[in-house]
Image: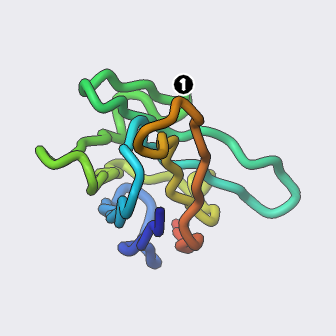
Amino acid sequence: VQLQASGGGLVQAGGSLTLSCAASRNSFSINTMGWYRQAPGKQRELVAGITRGGVTTYADSVKERFSISRDNAGDTVLLQMDSLKPEDTAVYYCNTQATRYGTSYVYSFWGQGTQVTVSS
């Protein structure tokens, strides 16, 4: 599975950005898709995730501000980020848990990071 992420950039505090991640599934079934972020000197953390059935999960720090969604085909995930804060500054990574067709093995794939910078 290849993941192509886009949408990062520089925004002022209080502004909005939308991140997009498209998966090329090849011989895999895409299960959960999500976004992680890693700020300098910190560990990578889950921001938001969405299952194939549409069940979502969010980090407490982004609840009520971020929204994750997925297209009907299940291959593209969007992260709408509103009311951005300087502490949201990080490299954001797209992730998917995918199962190879004909097996029950679950693999984890990562996209290239996209920088989000929120100025105060």
Whether residue 85 appears in this view of the structure is yes
> Which residue occupies the foreground of this view, 12 or 29?
29
Q: Is residue 42 left or right of residue 4?
A: right
> Farthest residue toward the front?
102
Residue at image location 52% in from the left, 66% down from the top: 118
Quarter of the image holding residue 56? top left
Is the residue 110 above or below the residue 99 in the image?
below
Quarter of the image holding residue 49? top left
Residue occupied by mark 1: 60
Residue at image location 48% in from the left, 40% down from the top: 99
Is the residue 66 above or below the residue 2 in the image?
above
**Amino acid beneath label 1:** Asp
Whether residue 21 appears in this view of the structure is no
Q: Quadrant of the C terminus?
A: bottom right
Q: Where residue 81 sits in the image (x, y, percent)?
A: 35, 51
> Which residue occupies the foreground of this view, 107 or 5?
107
Q: Is residue 110 left or right of residue 54?
A: right
Please state the total of marks drawn on the protein image. Answer: 1
Residue at image location 36% in from the left, 44% down from the top: 29
Q: Where residue 19 sits in the image (x, y, percent)?
A: 36, 63
Q: Where residue 57 sits in the image (x, y, percent)?
A: 43, 25
Q: Where residue 98 sits in the image (x, y, percent)?
A: 48, 43
Residue at image location 27% in from the left, 54% down from the top: 75
